[in-house]
Image (spheres, rainbow, N blue to C red):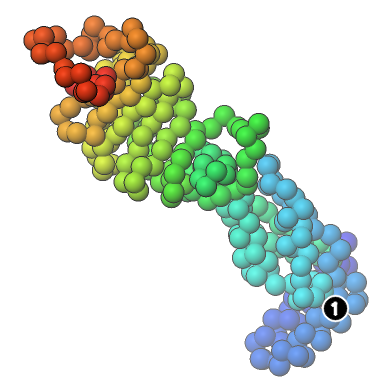
Amino acid sequence: MSWYILLGMIIAVALALLSVFQVPQLVGTAAGEAVGEAGFAVKRVEVKGLNRMDPIQAHYVAASQQSMAMPLVDLELTRERLLRLGWVREARVSRRWPDTLVVDIVERTPAAIWQHNQQLTLIDRDGVVLEPVKLDAMPDLPLVIGPAANQHTTDLTRLLTAAPQLKPMLAGATWVGGRRWDLRFHSGEVLALPEGEESAEKALVYFARMDKLTQLLGKGLVRFDMRIPGKFIVRVSSEPGSVVPAELAPPPPPKPAPAPANQGPVDPATVI
């Protein structure tokens, strides 16, 4: 092994001298190929750091070289190709003489599932698509829905840190109109937040406080609308018997005049 190390050092110095004295590329390539034929060619690819990514992808990229001679392996180009793989956040490629390429990979961490165009894909916190997700094998992660919703996953994560007690209750979030979030909870309710990061955060904090005081979630309500500043609109189910909890219901208004026979149904909502 010490002989291999010594020979590798001699080769490295020789290649460095070729570069310093600007020997034509053809001569350098011929020298590299000669070194490869002498036994210093890639025979193994060792991939480290993988947890969920298919190792075959990394092996394939690392082994796709114009020349398998160790001195001629393009380490930087190999790294760039690895970074194009969805799961790879960072990569490093190095030679281990006499015949091994070592690939160290830092994987991306799944953060959510993105639903768009009737497809489900796993994404990381930066919205990078990692791999398709099957409906019958969905991981326990938040669902973000809508065009470009994946690009706002970081914003959603930051928003939820303002009310961490609600995060375990969140089933999914829809990016609406490219400007705001609708949050859907496991108990079935939807919370419509206003536009703007600051306004959405204040609204979510207020909702979390109200839920702590009055237990808004899990009482059969349908929708909470906080898009209008200063108003908290609660919508109940249209099913018979559905009511707004007493803690939220405003004083009953005067009895209205009978509606004309041709008037459509009244939307069951309460403004607080």
Q: Amino acid at mark 1?
A: Val
* Residue 107 in view here: no
Left or right: 43 with respect to 186?
right
Please determine whether, in this image, residue 1 is positioned above or below residue 182. Answer: below
Residue designated by label 1: 35
Side of 162 where 120 appears, left or right = right
Residue 81 at what x, y percent from top left? Answer: 65, 64
- Residue 251, how many percent across, how many down? 13, 9
Taking 108 as reference, is 44 above or below it?
Answer: below
**Quarter assignment of residue 21:** bottom right
Left or right of 188: which side holds 45? right
Quadrant (top left/top right/bottom left/bottom right) for the N terminus:
bottom right
Q: 161 or 195, which lies in front?
A: 195
Tell me the quarter of the image containing the C terminus: top left
Q: Residue at x 73, y 62 (%)?
A: 61
Residue 31 placement: quadrant? bottom right
